[in-house]
Amino acid sequence: MLFVRRRVLLPVPAGLALLLLTCLTGCGSGSPHARPRMGPSLAKPTFVTVLNSPAARRVPFGFLGLSLEYRAVEAYAGTDPSAIDPVFEQLVRNLVPGQALVLRIGGDSADRTWWPVPGLVRPTGVKFDITDRWLRVTRALAHALRARLILGLNFEADDPTLASAEAGALLEGIGPGAIRALELGNEPDLYATFPWYRLSDGRHVTGRPPSYDMAGLIEDFTRFAATLPATMLAGPSLGAPGWTRELGRFLAAEPRVGLVTLHRYPLQLCYTPHDAARYPTVDHLLSPAASIGLADSFARYAVLAPGRGHSLRIDELNTVSCGADPAVSQTFASALWALDTLFEMARVGIHGVNVHTFPGAGYELFRISRLRGRWQAVVGPEYYGLMLFARAAPAGSRLLDVQNGASGALRVWATQSGTGTVRVLAVNAGARARVVSVRVAGAQPVRARLERLLAPGVRSSSGVTLAGQSFGPRTFTGRLAGRPDVSMVAATGGRYVVTVPAGSAALLVLAQPATGAA
């Protein structure tokens, strides 16, 4: 229990009373392994006030999405369109309750795809054939999940005929009703830097010359767009901040673009000195630069894109780019990072985020396999953070103002649903427990439900629990298992007092409607 109802016979100073209340409470009921390690209890309380602002941003439907490479579709969903992997289906549904999934299929593999075209020679850089079976599986998956797809086209091959043939095959094979947009290529800002393929003697061949710049991209995009079906186009799919600064120039030249897409990873493995702030470490991932700074870097574009009638999606996001780095990406730190970063993206007005995953990625959200005809998945720590975000920020809810919501490594967020239910999330990425005293302005004094996201430590790769439940070493259902560990918290003097252990998150849900509901 997180509250104590008892008679105090001796006068106690208000500050000490609050600390005593916190020391005596906070563990809740349920399985002992799920109970948080409170650590030092005499922490100075952080007093936060949640305000109901009429101008608060809404969390759009479809805000949280996934991004897959082309090969990942059959690896996760299977090769039988009549029997889509039910474990993968459930893992996706956990993240988008009551809404359709925005699924992006592309990434590096988009520029290595091929749909056979009579009279066209298969480009050397192609590594993946789009087949009739792949189309049927993707169509079945989209139908099962009610998904809206962003589909990448091969742009790096520099052949509009190939891209047009792929677009036609995707529209016919999957159905235009399931396709939100066609995305030309993947990070063309890197076409002149990273090899598209290697020759037999080991020499690198790039997709564009060293002089390639925004003017070249606009010229290519315009040339390709003229050959494509009348379907919404997504782009420019940029990852480099320098190129992104020219987004306004790109949009002014490309009227066919209806969905603006950008990419970003806070940390980078290759070409990064070990002492650089972007080098993959747990401390760097949990730093403000990796979440607050990352979101702030998109703030101007979140204003620019809607001003031109576009939506802006960060349709490829995860922890570490340019190489596998499970020592950081497969730790509990990734769950706390993802949770806070998604709220930060919503704060600056991003319309949606697609978290990237594929088999073999250092940041893979889940490893899916089939043994003797039975599907199973090993779920990574980051997935738990995404799942808690889905609970804390239901689609259509409004982000409420939180006074004193940022205090060192502690971040406090709040949302209000259309029914008036208020949810308050505290993310503690620090090394010591924090006491949070929450007042919700205008809310009725109700008992609130408390759920915790916990792990043995921020560097742990296992032992993660959400409200006392977990997927265990592997799951055959895609559902959390175990007895829920949920506490009920009463307001004391109009405040809800919660201890948030070091390296953990806590979600407080005021289940009864609050006044001034949207």
Image: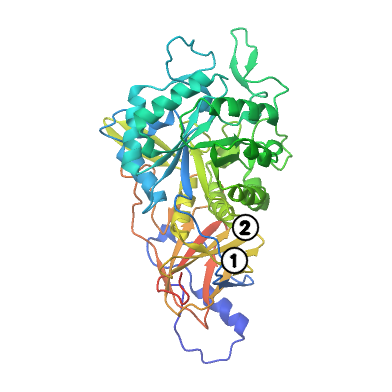
Front residue of this view, candidates 427 and 421:
421
Q: Position of residue 200 (x, y in %)?
A: 59, 7
Q: Position of residue 258 (x, y in %)?
A: 53, 41
Answer with left or right where residue 486 lies relative to residue 326: left
Q: Where does label 1 land, which residue?
A: 434
Q: Is residue 351 above or below residue 398?
A: above
Residue under the point 67% across and 36% down: 240
Q: Which mark is residue 430?
A: 2
Marks 2,1: beta carbons within 8 A: yes
Query: What is the three-letter code of the residue carrying label 1?
Result: Arg
Residue under the point 50% across and 43% down: 354
Residue under the point 58% across and 54% down: 349
Q: Residues within 10 Å of mark 1 (few under 14, many from 20)?
A: many
Q: Residues within 10 Å of mark 2 (few under 14, many from 20)?
A: some
Q: Is residue 221 above or below residue 365?
A: above
Q: Quadrant of the N terminus?
A: bottom left
